[in-house]
Amino acid sequence: MLYNHTEYRKEDRNSTITTVNKVGRFKIIPEKRLILIYFIGEISIDELIFLNKCSFKAPGYDASFDVIVDLRDCYPKANIDDLRYYINFINENKSFYKKRKGVYLTSKPEEVVATTLFSKMHKDVPFEIEIFSTVSAMTFWLNRNRINTQFIENELKKIRLDSHNVYLEE
């Protein structure tokens, strides 16, 4: 069963209840030293942190694996304070964030704005961040010898069709 748009209730850090349609998924690919993260719907910093915490507990998680975050089917909800909050979360959990590359795959202006702000503000976090709108450019930057564009496109297609949704497992 595919959970594309599931109603989900959660208490955010401001103690307000939100009910929205969202999906969060991740996949760890140890042989490629890669973590894929995929979102659908409106996603706040709290949901991003929640998904990060879920991935930390997953078998095979390695803080040095590169990360691809596919934002093309979501609408990030983040202001400057939210981004500072997220950077603070990363700094408080450095054992889960080692030197690695982080890629944001975007398709809409609001995704580019949020990720660009984050990439400019993240000076104290231990990873490089880049923003791309194509899988081929992203793959080249990550390391063409380790992964290829077709492999990433296939894995992103699989994760889109997967039924896993971290927001249903609270």
Image (tube, helix red, strand yellow):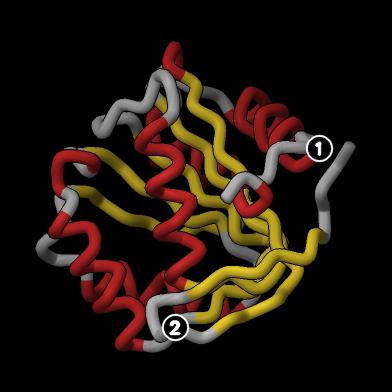
Which image quadrant: the N terminus?
Answer: top right
Report crowding for label 2: few under 14, some 14 to 19, many 20 or more residues within 10 A (C-alpha).
few
In the picture, the disc for residue 15 is: 2
> Does residue 84 sit above or below 35 in this rendering?
below
In this picture, residue 124 sits left or right of residue 141: left
Location of residue 135 in the rendering, given as x and y in whole percent from the top left corner: 60, 44
- Could you say which is closer to the camera, residue 170 or residue 65? 170
Which amino acid is tagged 1? Leu
Question: CA separation, marks 1 and 2?
Answer: 32 Å
Q: Is residue 7 visible?
A: yes
Residue found 33% across the figure and 87% down from its top: 80
Residue 59 location, x and y as percent? 42, 20
Specify the label residue 161 is tagged with: 1
Amino acid marked by disc 2: Ser
Nearer-the-camera pick, 107 or 85? 85
The residue drawn where x is 44% and y is 71% is: 45
Judged left or right of residue 126, residue 89 is right
Q: How many marks?
A: 2
Question: 10 Å neighbourhood of mark 1: few (<14), some, or many (≥20)?
Answer: few
Mark 1, secondary structure of its residue: helix
Is residue 134 visible in the rendered image? The answer is: no
Residue at the image point whose x is 25% and y is 51% from the top: 128
Q: Earlier in the sequence, mark 1 or mark 2?
A: 2
Question: Is residue 144 positioned above or below 76 on the image?
Answer: above
Q: Residue furthest left?
A: 124
